Amino acid sequence: MAYTEVTRTGYGTRLKNSLGGVLIGILMFIGGTILLWWNEGNAKKTYDILKEGEKIYVEMENPAVKSPDMEGQLVHAVALATTTDSLSDGTFNVGAVAVKLHRSVEYYQWIEHASSTSKDKIGGAKETTTTYTYKKDWTGAPVDSRSFHDPDYQDLNFVYSEIEDASSNAENVTFGAYRLNSGQVSSFHNEQPLNVEMDTDLVKQMDKAARDNARSFLSRGGLTDQIPDSAAVIHTQGNTVYIGRNPNVPEVGDVRITFTKDMPSKVSIIAKVVGDSFTSYKGKNNYELEMLYMGEKTADFMFTRAYDARMVKLWMLRILGILIIIGGLRSIVSIVPTLLKVLPFLGQIVETGLGLVCGIVGLVWSLIIIAIAWLRYRPVLGICLLVVAGLLIFWLVKRSKKKKLAKAGIPDPQVPPTPQAPEIQIPQYQQPAQPAQPEQPQMTPEQQKEFEQWKQFQEFKKMQEQMKNNNGQ
């Protein structure tokens, strides 16, 4: 069942937090800059020591025979790493002849998970809704349930016994006629299960201590009857010691201890020979070179893997440094959107805009720092990167100028005006002129009367002729 908690942060508190964020942002900006600078130098020096090692290393053909000629040399060798040392775990009295011995402990506990959503309010306050959910699972350390937010889950966690992880390494690990140093032994890994066989008296002693510890806790809630005196809570199976009622049905408070051992195996090393052992080779740039890989590996394989690991580390730290710088810039300017969040929509708009600007500025600054570092370590690449950063800055300035001119309604002087197409005059159709009609002479009233009588006479004659024609037919 989920438990929800709503908290409200006032406008004044948010402003105070933003002011504190300015100082944190400055430290982040400086820290990210230093990280980028160091990372580029470290990558170049690592590359140089690997190149130096590739040129001077020699093959140790037979590590089983100690050779004076190998003294002080950087060598590549393959041999069986083994030991006669017996390692043991004092708490559980288990052990074996092995290169390394490990004890890993897990606890079955209630675990609190939180998810939050925030909403800005008019006036500058912020309302945060946090939902807490609880799940039982295995974890590497006891969980203090007294700090849980849901009162129903507080004080539910306990453990039968608190036991720490532990490991031990053999002191004498031979490599043919030589010995591996402590750093090489720590890099060794060939884990296998270590079967547990505990003494009966020890099992009884630990069983009683575990039940007493459980009762001590459960008595506070009146739940002592959950751990009867007759219930055995120590169980061993294979390489596991299980403290709890039933290993197949885990309950809160159960503890699971797993034992493993690193057994002898062939290894490949690149290191400097010193007496009957090895040490790191120190290059001209004072960087050290030493490698150990499990199994039979060629020197080419080991150097190639080292170059790959260097590139992965370089880019991971580059990205981390850039993100730290951008985060620092956003923290520095966070006071501005916070001031404007009396109107949430306005603060959100400004925050989005400033976030974009901080991202671009942080990227440009990062490129400049990387380029300056390269000017020291890789001049040609450094110059190229400075040119790229310069072009980005030029683009940003030009883009900003265009926006200002557009807002003011002024055309950009650097942009030539768009040529206008010449206006095409379409001739209009004109009707051809009609020939002038001869002007009719003007008639007097008497002439006009005579003309009318003449017209009537002519019409009468036409009617007579038409009647004659009709009679003739």
Image: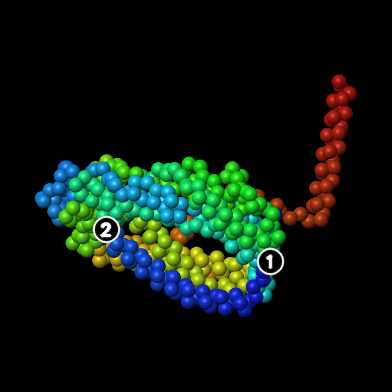
- In this picture, is 238 found above or below 6? above
In this picture, residue 8 sits left or right of residue 398: right
Q: Which residue: 42% across, 49% down?
A: 94
How many marks on residues? 2
Q: Which residue: 21% across, 60% down?
A: 282
Instruction: Single out the residue that lies furthest toward the top.
Output: 473
Question: Percent from the top left, x then y, of residue 438?
Answer: 65, 50
- In this picture, is 109 found above or below 6? above
Q: Disc 1 residue type?
A: Val
Report which residue position mark 1 lands on: 6
- Front residue of this view, candidates 234 and 391: 234
Q: Which residue: 36% across, 66% down?
A: 35
How would you rate the neighbour count of disc 2 (Cα within 10 Å): few for under 14, some for 14-19, many for 20 or more? many
Question: Percent from the top left, x then y, of residue 230?
Answer: 63, 49
Query: In which quadrant of the rendered image does the N terminus lie?
Result: bottom right
Marking on residue 37: none
Report which residue position mark 2 lands on: 46
In this picture, residue 87 sits left or right of residue 406: left
Q: Which residue: 22% across, 63% down?
A: 286
Question: Percent from the top left, x then y, of residue 443?
Answer: 76, 54
Say if residue 411 shows up in the picture: no
- Front residue of this view, candidates 352 and 448: 352
- In this picture, is 141 found above or below 34? above
- Front residue of this view, candidates 184 and 16: 184
**Distance between the alpha carbons at the discs numbered 1 and 2:** 51 Å
